Image (cartoon, rainbow, N blue to C red):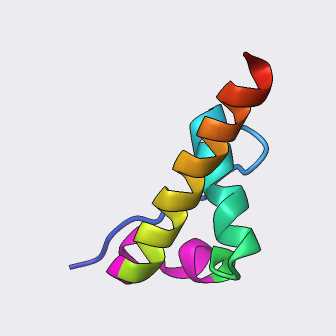
Amino acid sequence: MSKKKEKIDLNNLAPEEELKYEIAKELGLLDKVMEQGWKALTAKETGRIGGLMTRRRREEKKSGA
């Protein structure tokens, strides 16, 4: 059983996706994601990304309001 891997165009992402990839890069997980996909991450890694995304969105709302 083989899965087709779609090439991700990092220059053409929705803002939400862009933030997710940016945080993955900062955490040193981008290579893993690009090679194996998001499912290769552990629950801890995924939670860390989600937590940082939430924090950044909250900070953006505070500074923008």
**Quadrant in the picture for the C terminus:** top right
Q: Position of residue 22 (x, y in %)?
A: 72, 58
Q: Please tell me whether residue 3 belongs to the stretch shown in magenta.
A: no
- Which picture quadrant has residue 18? top right
Q: Nearer the viewer, residue 61 or 36?
A: 61
Q: Position of residue 34 (x, y in %)?
A: 60, 72
Residue name at image x 33 percent, y 78 percent: 43
| Magenta residues, start to end | 32-43
Magenta stretch, main secondary structure, is helix
Where 55 falls versus 57 (above or below)?
below
Q: Is residue 5 left or right of residue 63?
A: left
Q: Is residue 33 left or right of residue 46?
A: right
Q: Please tell me whether residue 41 belongs to the stretch shown in magenta.
A: yes
Q: Position of residue 63 (x, y in %)?
A: 79, 28
Q: Residue furthest left?
A: 1
Q: Position of residue 40 (x, y in %)?
A: 40, 81
- Which picture quadrant has residue 1? bottom left
Q: Is residue 37 visible?
A: no
Where 18 falls versus 63 (above or below)?
below
Where 43 falls versus 12 (above or below)?
below
